[in-house]
Amino acid sequence: MQRRFWLMVLLILAGAAYALQKAAPLRGEWRPDEVAPGVYVIHGPTELPSPSNQGFMNNPAFVLSGEGVVVIDPGSSVQVGEMLLAHIEKVTDKPILAVFNSHIHGDHWLGNQAIRARYPEVPIYGHDRVGPKVLAGAGTEWVQLMLRLTENATLGTDVIAPDHPLKDGDVLRIGGLTYRVMNNDKAHTDTDIMLHIEELDVMFLGDNAGHGRILRLEGGSFPGNITALENALASGATVFVPGHGPSGGSEVATRYRDYLQTLYETVQQGVEEGLADFEIRPLLLPKLGPWQQWAGFDSELGPHISGAYLEAEAAAF
């Protein structure tokens, strides 16, 4: 009897230990929106990771075909990835054929873990710079950042890096659909890919655009990001999915391009006139009225001016 009692105690302790290794499932009534035939996007919150949103902040997406499912940016944690899987399984019983990660930032790809756990052989595609950077430490940094910002709401998330490298101009045929890879070296980061699904006229922009949200631009390029969005607009796509915020038509890419262009050209002019970055801000603010209510505007404007100033100053020499 005593042995049985201690065995029960050990089982309870083991269960408690396991529970401590993984945070609770994602809360909230998130649902996929069908933005084009067979193309679903779960539009996440536009705020930064927090305990209240459990780190969910991006736009996980999936594309159905006759053969299976392609996932794009499965989210910021194993919990987000599992939520995405549950929604996919409500729509289809077909398997996942492939996963794409749009860039290095972990809020878009840490959900790889949930997909790989269910489909151990699934290929995970990303720019050829992403995998090495993730394995060199960026992955661990993102896991720790998400834990800190969410007060451990993403606990249990492990690093699963993309293992199938891509470059600009690559064309993949998956499930009867054509995925054309677009990259112009440096835009939001130096690891971005955009995906044009040609048969559906759908463009996945990654974080080259936010819609209703201003995004960080650290290690990227203002002119490069502008060029990326102009390339996307020239693709012939009619549906555009941003990394954050609602999907829509060409206005998704146009509005963000116009924000970047307005900011960079104003800063560039200020540099030519010998102004300091703090002197440019009051000249710039009246021009940015259309974006001042977007999430992240107040927090990102200062860093954007400083980054654009450094880039414009370097370009002038």
Image (cartoon, rainbow, N blue to C red):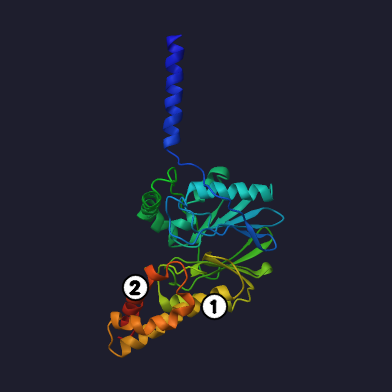
Dot 2 corresponds to which residue?
A: 302
Q: Measuring 50% from the left and 75% from the top, which residue is drawn there?
A: 256
Q: Which mark is residue 205?
A: none
The furthest residue to the right = 66
Question: Which-is-in-front pick, marks 1 and 2?
Answer: 2
Q: Measuring 51% from the left and 59% from the top, which residue is drawn there?
A: 45
The answer to whether the residue labelled 1 contacts the one labelled 2, judged by CB atoms less than 8 Å apart, is: no
Q: Nearer the viewer, residue 24 or 239?
A: 24
Taking the image as drawn, is residue 283 in sight? Answer: yes
**Crowding at mark 2 (Cα within 10 Å: few <14, some 14-19, many 20+):** some
Q: Secondary structure at mark 2?
A: helix
Q: Is residue 286 above or below residue 43?
A: below
- The image shows a total of numbered marks equal to 2
Q: Report which quarter residue 298 is drawn in.
A: bottom left
- Indicate the position of residue 245 as horizontal and vertical percent values: 53, 65
Q: Report which quarter residue 205 is drawn in.
A: bottom right
Taking the image as drawn, is residue 115 in sight? Answer: no
In screen coordinates, is 29 left or right of 19?
A: right
The furthest residue to the bottom = 273
Question: Which quadrant: the C terminus?
Answer: bottom left
In screen coordinates, is 301 left or right of 169?
A: left
In screen coordinates, is 175 left or right of 309?
A: right
For badge 2, the amino acid type reads Gly
Q: Which mark is residue 254?
A: 1
> What is the C-alpha distance between the residues marked 1 and 2?
22 Å
Q: Is residue 194 above or below residue 30?
A: below
- Indicate the position of residue 5 as horizontal and vertical percent values: 44, 14
**Crowding at mark 1 (Cα within 10 Å: few <14, some 14-19, many 20+):** some
- Indicate the position of residue 286 as horizontal and vertical percent values: 41, 83
- Indicate the position of residue 24 as horizontal and vertical percent values: 48, 41
The furthest residue to the top = 1
